[in-house]
Image (cartoon, helix red, strand yellow):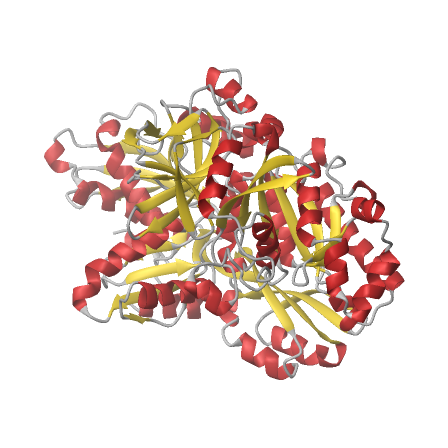
Amino acid sequence: MATKENVVHHVAGLMNNQENIRNIGIVAHVDHGKSTLSDSLVAKAGLISKQLAGEQRVLDFEQIEQQRGITIKAANISIPLNHKGTDYLINLIDTPGHVDFGGHVTRALRAVDGAVLVVDCVEGIMPQTETVLRQALREKVKPVLFINKIDRFITELKLDSNAMQQKFLKIITGVNKLIKDFASDEFKEKWQIKVEEGNVAFGSAFNKWAISYPVMKEKNISFKQMYDFCQKGDHSTLQEFAPLDDVIIEMIITHLPNPLHAQKYRVPVIWHGELESEIGKTMLECDSKGQLAFGVTAIQTDPHAGEVAVGRVYSGVLKKGDEVYLSSHYKKEKVQQVAIYMGPDRVVLDQASAGNIVALVGLKDVTAGETISSDEITPFEQIKHHSEPVITKSIEAKNPKDLVRLIEVLHKFAKEDPTLRVEINQTTGEHLLSGMGELHLEIIETKIKEEKGIEIVTSKPIIVYHETITGQGPTLEGKSPNKHNKFKVSVEPLEEGVIKAFEEGEVDDKMKGKDLQERLIKAGLPRPEGRKVLDVFRGNLFVDATKGVQGLQDVMELLIEGFEEAMKEGPLAKENSVGVKVKLEDALIHVDPAHRGPSQIIPAIKRPLYAGMLYAGCILLEPKQKLVVTCPSDYMSGVIGQVQSRRGQITSIEQEGELVIINAKVPVSEMFGFSSEVRSASQGRAAWYVEYAGYEKLPPDLQNQVILSIRKRKGEPEQLPTVSTFLD
């Protein structure tokens, strides 16, 4: 095995040869074999023994990942490899497959140019396979395909070689359909997966062998021979003929692009500045001699070094001691170290040039999605997460002396994982932690207890509902408590296109100025309103529709604060409002600043806004999940009964041999306890999987019941609010 020092020295030497760099991610549905495949690539570089590859799961280096046997966060490693006499540097990111940790995949895909999509041959294309491939294609990350666990076809399904090839064809056709549906026009055909082109491999990551068309030709091995060896369980001969690492590396180097090539088409997708500018040109060319541009994709926390920013250098060079500009904080900070990750270890380098994935130490205020540059430049596009928190738990420290540490730890986790939301309930003083699902929150709780040593008490999971309006409200007047300030506001639903732009991340709260206006207008907001948007907050808009009001600028910050407070806690149940457009129609403002402080202005805008939402038919939206259950056909009726008893809508039922695949949409609130119920309904033979499916209207017969139960939980009066609650 190579020493780590030799490997690091080798990596540093390869970082300047961009022709021979490949930045790749390994992506797949949960348990399809990503970490096992990564082990073989790491062993190829001599960092672990080949015997242990597949069992060591070197990139699942956190204790909790090893205990549970799943990848929880994206792990980086830089591997120097020699392929056919040429040295290459592969910057590899192994990503999680579980839906609750999808945010890590989204962020990792920003840093890479190519992806190895791993598919379990028996399970085929699962919902998360589709999700990760769609995300990769949206970022213009080129895929290649590895169909894994093909020994299961022979040992479990007893398929002959022809039936096996038909199954492969089905998976390849499915992947190609997704590429056709989600790739940009220029790549719909170019990126198609074809056996004869060699951008697909078949094999067993655990048994460390794989074959592809070029290998079959080169080694003169037929598909039938491979099948025979596999049937005999002779994996060692297959390993000699076609080692997994060689086949996958051949595919990566031949079919996935280097940074020089990839940045020409990727930069216009992830950076919307002026491409003809000096920084634009240097990024397109991946030029190390140009100005620095670095995109942060992940924050890791190191107990000794503090926060470590992991990301990609798109242009320029990074050195220890450099003063760099942080776009979201409008200030400069000093880089204390530049390093690369070798799995769990971070190894310091002298410098890093364009086209590499590296880690920076010493930037205190850095966040995931941050743009780092020599001087102020247009920031990179925000990283778009495709699901949002749907479950909340309240978390308290068992021992009051741990309270300050608990707050610090929660905010650290939220910084590492932007899909986690931490809020304090001002009324009760509870800390509310919202995440993607039960497992997401369970992992955070375990880390707080075991890694940080803080004993905590948690509530039962609480579902995150949203409030929205179904129609247009009248113009209503709100007065400040001292009656000296008056505001006329109206509310109406946001245009469908604008709601979609929020959901897809085309528009977000951090955008400002002309870029924001143009995006909103393009999404369907009338141009006169688009030019007068005062604030964007959590999927809602505040528009100035006034004409020549005196003193409006003096109270503008307070009006925006009042609007945001109202959107954060809607009138029905103090849940987050979405899809609401608030128009400020007119205002009368007192000339004396003493009469227009926060205690006067905020209630004067919030109260008519709330009343307007009730007039406009305010309702609750509930989070839904896409549910896929695979089970033997004998147990189908029991599983369907379980789904329907939970208000689930069956969307399709497919038959595959003895197995049935049931697709459904189920409310998150009804999914508690599903796993034990479905196990007993199928005698443990059902495999199931859920994925975020957005928010939909809560059925009318449940609206009042749920509103009152939320109000009771939050200590609000246990009666439905009316317009007179908010207007005198």
| Residue 592 in the image: above or below residue 183 | above
Locate residue 664, reporting x and y percent. 64, 65
- Say which residue appears at 38% left-offset and 50% top-offset: 416
Q: Quick check: can you spot residue 41?
A: yes
Q: Quick check: can you spot residue 569?
A: no
In depth, the one of 253 and 486 nearer the eye is 253
- Say which residue appears at 71% left-offset and 48% top-offset: 247
| Residue 371 in the image: above or below residue 635 | above
Quadrant of the rendered image containing residue 675: bottom right
Q: Is residue 692 left or right of residue 211?
A: left
| Residue 455 in the image: above or below residue 341 | below
Locate residue 662, reporting x and y percent. 69, 68
In depth, the one of 381 and 627 nearer the eye is 381
Locate residue 347, reporting x and y percent. 40, 43
Quadrant of the rendered image containing residue 545: top left
In depth, the one of 656 and 643 nearer the eye is 656
Q: In this view, does 319 lie to the left or right of 269?
A: left
